[in-house]
Structure formats: structure tokens, C-alpha cells
Image (spheres, grey):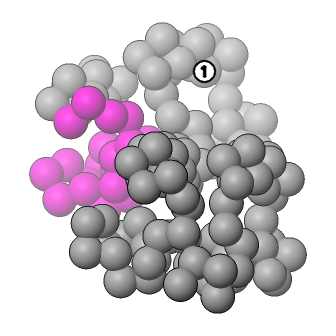
Amino acid sequence: MYQKLVAYKKKHKSTIVPTEYQADPSLGIWVHSQRTNYIKKELHIDRINHLESIGFVWNAYDMNWREIYYRLVAYKMQHDSTAVPYRCTEDPSLGLWVSTQRVAYNNGKLSGKRLELLNSINFVWSAKKAS
């Protein structure tokens, strides 16, 4: 399976394989089980090192969050603001993501690290201030 993951990364430039990967369902399941076993601390250190040597992403959700965060940073550099409209024609998913961060913050569900990152770029926490 490891070699299949190496081939997948070469083709897709990522080790984030969907669990229901149509081209090879067993690869998606295997990658998911590596992450699960890592979290449970049931993965041997040699396997961890082997996977990390190809840039394995242990937390796919965090990786996706950071990718969108960097799009927000680029947006701020261009517009001098993090007040992305909900219906942002330039990057529609970014507007939705910004709104989701506000909801998570208001519900106390935003991690300290994410809060720190967003505050570091003067994130606009109020949608009213954004409009």
C-alpha cells in the first residue's frame, strides 16, 4: 500500500487520499487507518517515519484549514482586509469559510491556535463590520 500512496502523491501532489477513492478504494481505507492508528498511538515508529519521509499529512482537516487560511492571507494582501463577502465572486468558497470561522468563534468551537492565526492577520470577527 505504501508504494501505491507514493504513486498517488506523485500524481496528485498530496497524501490526502479520499476514504472512498474510486480508482483504488483500498488505498483510501488504508490511508484512513494509518491516521486512525496514529491517533490511537498504535502505529510503529518505523511506519510513522516512513510515512513522514514522503510528507504524509496526519491531520487532513487541519491541512485543508491551513490551505484556505493562506488563501485568506492572499485575499488580505490584495484587498487590505479580511472582510470577505459571503458571496465572494472572486473565491466563493472563501466567503463561506470566513463565515464558518465566525460561527465557530461565536460558539466557542475555534481552537486557540486557529484563533491566534486569524487574529494575527486582523480577522474581522463581525459580519456587520465586513459589509
The quadrant holding residue 86 is: bottom left
Is residue 37 positioned above or below 53 on the image? below
Tell me the residue at 20%/24% (across/down): 10
Q: Is residue 124 left or right of residue 77?
A: right
Is residue 103 positioned above or below 114 on the image? below
Is residue 15 positioned above or below 54 on the image? below
Q: Which residues are magenta?
A: 12-33
Q: Is residue 22 magenta?
A: yes
Please state which amino acid type lies under the numbered disc 1: Ile
- In the image, farthest residue toward the front: 80
Could you tell me how many numbered marks the image carries?
1
Residue 113 vs residue 19, the one in the foreground? 113
Numbered disc 1: secondary structure? helix
- Can residue 34 be seen here? The reply is no
Q: Quadrant of the N terminus?
A: top left
Location of residue 8 in the rendering, given as x and y in whole percent from the top left corner: 22, 33
Location of residue 118 in the rendering, given as x and y in whole percent from the top left corner: 69, 53
Which residue has dot 1 on it? 48
Q: Is residue 123 left or right of residue 110?
A: left
Tell me the residue at 54%/69% (across/down): 83
Q: Residues within 10 Å of mark 1 (few under 14, many from 20)?
A: some
Tell me the residue at 67%/21% (across/down): 44
Tell me the residue at 68%/16% (across/down): 45
Location of residue 117 in the rendering, given as x and y in whole percent from the top left corner: 71, 46
Q: Is residue 61 left or right of residue 119?
A: left
- Can residue 105 be seen here? The reply is yes
Residue 9 vs residue 79, the one in the foreground? 79
Location of residue 69 in the rendering, given as x and y in whole percent from the top left corner: 53, 50
